[in-house]
Amino acid sequence: MSVPRPVLLAVLGFLLISATFVATRHSSSDGGSTPAPAPQAAKPSPAPKAQNPAVHKATPAKPAAKAETKANAKTTPAHAPAAKAPAEAPGASSGLPASVAQAFAQHKIVVLFFEGRGADDEATAQSVKALKSASHGKVAVFSDKLSNLADYRRIVEGLDISQAPSTVVVGRDMKARLIEGFVDSGSLRQVVADVAG
């Protein structure tokens, strides 16, 4: 009895697949399989880099700011303490020109005029000159450039002078008054009279 060809092919295919399956299972269960790779020695982790400690620069404590007073010519001038005149010979101490120190030693009212190059400076300079001629020696008047302000630091310290013209009037009580900007001769005389009061 002959077996139909399709059935024969199906049987042969089944046998072939079964044989392949058995062969692969047999080879995987044998020691013939590829050996697993040997575990590699763990690489030593690099030592953590020492971090530089945060550098904190000590900020020096700022001294308490001195009370700064400032007044325009239109307002009542504010008072600020001025340094006392040195007991030594005039000009012996730093921070004051010799002529200014001498005026303090003679207990005069001192007027300092710091000028620039503007029109207000010229007009205020005329007021200061008028005061000088009318003071009869009771008021010592000095004029200088604003750039030389540091030469008068014992008087102007704390006044916050930042512009020209600026006029500082210092009475016998050693209090300083600052007038910033233009001041006419009448107003300047009144300030001096108030300080002399």
Image (cartoon, helix red, strand yellow):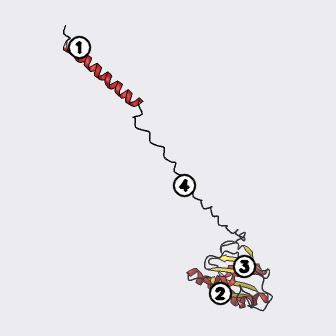
Q: Nearer the viewer, residue 185 or 14?
A: 14
Q: Nearer the viewer, residue 183 or 159?
A: 159
Who comes first in sequence, dot 1 or dot 2?
1
Name the amino acid, label 2.
Ser
Of badges 1 and 3, the one in the foreground is 1
Which mark is drawn over residue 46? 4
Return the residue at label 2. 143
Which mark is drawn over residue 7? 1
Who comes first in sequence, dot 1 or dot 4?
1
- Location of residue 19 (image quadrant): top left
* Separation of residues labelled 1 and 4 (CA atoms): 69 Å
* Separation of residues labelled 2 and 3 (CA atoms): 17 Å
Position in image of residue 129 (x %, y %)? 65, 88
Mark 3: give few (<14), some (14-19) or many (20+) Cα within 10 Å: some
Who comes first in sequence, dot 4 or dot 2?
4
Of badges 3 and 4, the one in the foreground is 4
Who comes first in sequence, dot 2 or dot 3?
2
* Separation of residues labelled 1 and 2 (CA atoms): 131 Å
Residue 90 against residue 163 in the figure, above or below: below
Q: Report whether 164 appears left or right of 34.
A: right
Name the amino acid, label 4.
Pro
Return the residue at label 3. 191
Residue 44 against residue 13 in the figure, above or below: below
Which type of secondary structure does the marked residue at label 2 adopt? strand
Which type of secondary structure does the marked residue at label 3 adopt? helix
* Separation of residues labelled 4 and 2 (CA atoms): 74 Å
Residue, far front: 31
Position in image of residue 138 (x %, y %)? 76, 88
Of badges 4 and 2, the one in the foreground is 4
